[in-house]
Image: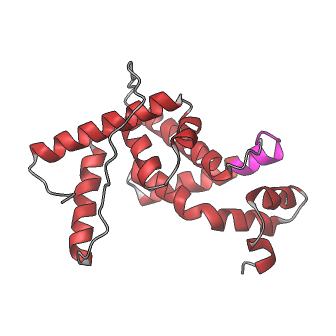
Amino acid sequence: MISMMHSNLSDQELISNYLKGDNASFEILVYRHKRKVYSSIIVLVKDPQLADDIFQDTFIKVIDKLHSKKYKDEGKFLAWVIRVAHNLVIDHFRREKHYPMIRDTEEYNVFDRLDLIQNSAQDDLMTKQTEKQLQELIDELPFEQKEVLILRHYCKMSFKDIAKCTDVSINTALGRMRYALIHLRKLIEERHLNLFD
């Protein structure tokens, strides 16, 4: 049961309390951010059991880093946790040799905004169908393009946070997003899909 006292505290206050021995504060942190962290993992690995394992490993690593004073608070705890999670995902893909080592050589300062799923009066079935088709297309993107698109549109992260989370410049993050959107549009046109009408 989450106490009201704990739930009103900032992430940094909860971290500070946890490091002083208040384990309930860490439980609040996990509860507060678990949906976004888990979502950012599952959309990349597509396997609930693997996602559960990586989610647990993420917070084990977070605990270790907090206790070893390796976390520097800049008001971006969620972005930091997602970065930890994504590093574990990348480690998994590297171990499995499924990680595409793609390097962007060009950087862009602008990107074409694409609203992935319009909020409309579609019924649930149509929405689920659209989401399924869209997810299948996103799955075909190179890993680095897929990652930035997921962080931007599903986790609602800023490009500044995405750049920090993925250890690249903001221009590179923008460039990857631009490539991802161009790639998606091409796939949509090739398959004559009307996902965004």
In the picture as drawn, the residue positioned furthest to the top comes out as 105
Q: Which residues are magenta?
A: 62-71
**Residue depicted at 39% across the width and 30% down the height:** 175
- The structure residue drawn at horizontal position 34% and vertical position 46%, both measured from the top left corner, is 113
The answer to whether residue 142 is left or right of residue 159 is left
- Look at the image and tell me in which quarter the C terminus lies: bottom left
Horizontal relation, residue 60 to residue 3: left or right: left
Name of the residue lying farthest toward the right: 20
- Residue at 47%, 48% in the rendered image: 151
**Residue 1 colored magenta?**
no
Q: Confirm whether the magenta stretch covers residue 67.
A: yes
Q: Is residue 103 left or right of residue 20?
A: left
Image position, residue 196 (x, y; %): 22, 57
Q: Confirm whether residue 99 shows in the render.
A: no
Whether 118 is drawn above or below 143: the answer is below
Q: Give whichever of 95, 109 is nearer the camera.
A: 109
| Total residue callouts | 0
Quadrant in which the N terminus appears: bottom right
The residue positioned farthest toward the front in the image shown:
110
Say whether residue 77 is left or right of residue 170.
right
Give the prevailing secondary structure in the magenta stretch: helix
Q: Position of residue 29 (x, y in %)?
A: 70, 62
**How is colour applied across the structure in the image?**
secondary structure
Give the x, y percent position of residue 171.
47, 28
Tell me if residue 25 comes above or below residue 71 in the rendering: below
Would residue 122 be visible to someone looking at this image?
yes
Work out whether 14 lies above or below 67: below
In this view, the residue in front, 118 or 33, is 118
